[in-house]
Amino acid sequence: MMTEVEEKYTERYKEEQRTIECPFCGKGKIDVTYVYPYMSWNVSRISAKSKRTKFYHDERYEVHKKCPECGKSRKEIKEALEQGHTKRLSHEDRIKLWKKRGLLLVLAGQN
């Protein structure tokens, strides 16, 4: 279990400049800095001994400007990227998706 967690994290702090689509409208181009998940060490010392503790830092985004198309703020875009916000599907699109997956849309006792 612990090796799966450690595989995701790197030993060094690493960031990359990216241009992404707006998570709300999908039209606007936004410049962000993506920081990869990484692991760091903290050393605590007392008179008898020192101890090293691992700290895992999750991935994060630093948004540089707001969306030019829909006008969402930098804070809203950052929260959407970190929490995995996607565009909401309309009711008709959801029904098409469910039918495509083979889901029954009518209960057996109803006509």
Image (cartoon, grey):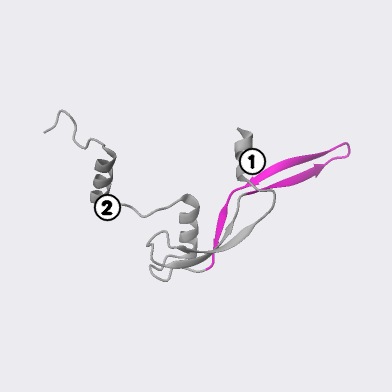
Q: Is residue 45 left or right of residue 77?
A: right
Gap between marks 2 and 1 measured at Cα: 39 Å
Q: Amino acid at mark 1?
A: Glu
The numbered disc on residue 90 is 2
Residue in the picture at 11% in, 33% down: 111
Q: Are marks 2 and 1 in contact (CB under 8 Å)?
A: no
Q: Is residue 24 left or right of residue 9?
A: left
Q: Is residue 41 left or right of residue 83?
A: right
Q: Which residue is mark 1?
A: 6
- Magenta part of the chain: 38-64
The numbered disc on residue 27 is none
Judged by depth in the image, the label closer to the viewer, 2 or 1, is: 1
* Residue 42 picture location, percent across and down: 75, 46
Which quarter of the rendering shows the N terminus? top right
How packed mark 2 is, by other alpha carbons closer than 10 Å (few <14, some 14-19, many 20 or more), is few
Q: Amino acid at mark 2?
A: Ser
